[in-house]
Amino acid sequence: MVTAKKTKKRILIALSGGVDSAVSAALLVRAGYDVTGVFVINYEGKNTYGEDCWVPEFRDAVRVAAHLNIPILKWNFAREYKEQVLEYMFREYESGRTPNPDVLCNKFVKFGAWLDRAVELGYDALATGHYAKKIEKNGIFSLGIPKDRVKDQTYFLHQLSQNQLARVQFPLASYTKTQVRSEEH
């Protein structure tokens, strides 16, 4: 009897250069997924040294990818971020309201434009270093409180659709920030 070879699930991990995304990537690699990192430019500007402000974080993300022996992509979504987050935020400020740019970024950019591109490229899911728990019950997805209640970031993800939630992973759901910072992971 011949059985079909099971292929690994392809996961695109958003690598910011920080510890949360680095540990998330390591956990996915350890779990046996086919992992690719992606560093995304959402804002273009210069730092005090005259270099693009994203360059130091990109260097860190490249180091993480090299350490984990995974490929890394670099995408530029500065236009989408400006149009869908910054411009709205400025209009709201001018109207006397205080929007939350993180909620907008997650809904329209990270799990909107980024996720769309990931799916177009054949990835099964987009993972991030958010402290959030994804729950599935009878094909319906919801967000749950992660193990680290202090770092809980579900509020920033509360506007994600069912289609978005179906294609995301949050590897840090079962970890505390202390555990993430420890050398065990």
Image: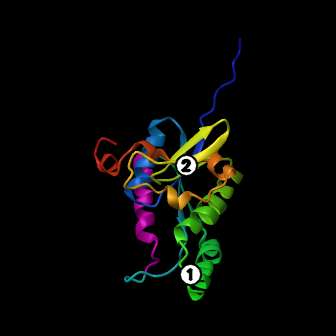
Taking the spot 52% from the left edge, 67% from the top edge, the residue there is 102
Taking the spot 62% from the left edge, 56% from the top edge, the residue there is 160
Amino acid type, label 1:
Arg
Q: Position of residue 123 (x, y in %)?
A: 64, 47
Q: Position of residue 133 (x, y in %)?
A: 50, 46
- The correct choice, above or below, for 54 with respect to 155 in the image is below
Q: Position of residue 107 (x, y in %)?
A: 62, 62
The nearer-to-camera label among 2 and 1 is: 1
Most extreme residue toward the top is 1
Report the magenta residues as a range.
51-68
Q: Mark 1 = which residue?
A: 97
Choose between 158 and 36: the one closer to the eye.
158
Taking the spot 49% from the left edge, 81% from the top edge, the residue there is 45
Q: Position of residue 108 (x, y in %)?
A: 64, 65
Between disc 2 and disc 1, whose residue precedes? 1
Most extreme residue toward the left is 183
Q: Quadrant of the C terminus?
A: top left
Number of callouts: 2
**6 horizontally vs 69: left or right:** right
- The correct choice, above or below, for 173 with respect to 1 in the image is below
- The correct choice, above or below, for 105 with respect to 50 in the image is above
Disc number for residue 20: none
Q: Mark 2 = which residue?
A: 143
Magenta-colored stretch includes residue 84: no
Here the colouring is rainbow
**13 horizontally vs 185: left or right:** right
Q: Main secondary structure of the magenta part?
A: helix
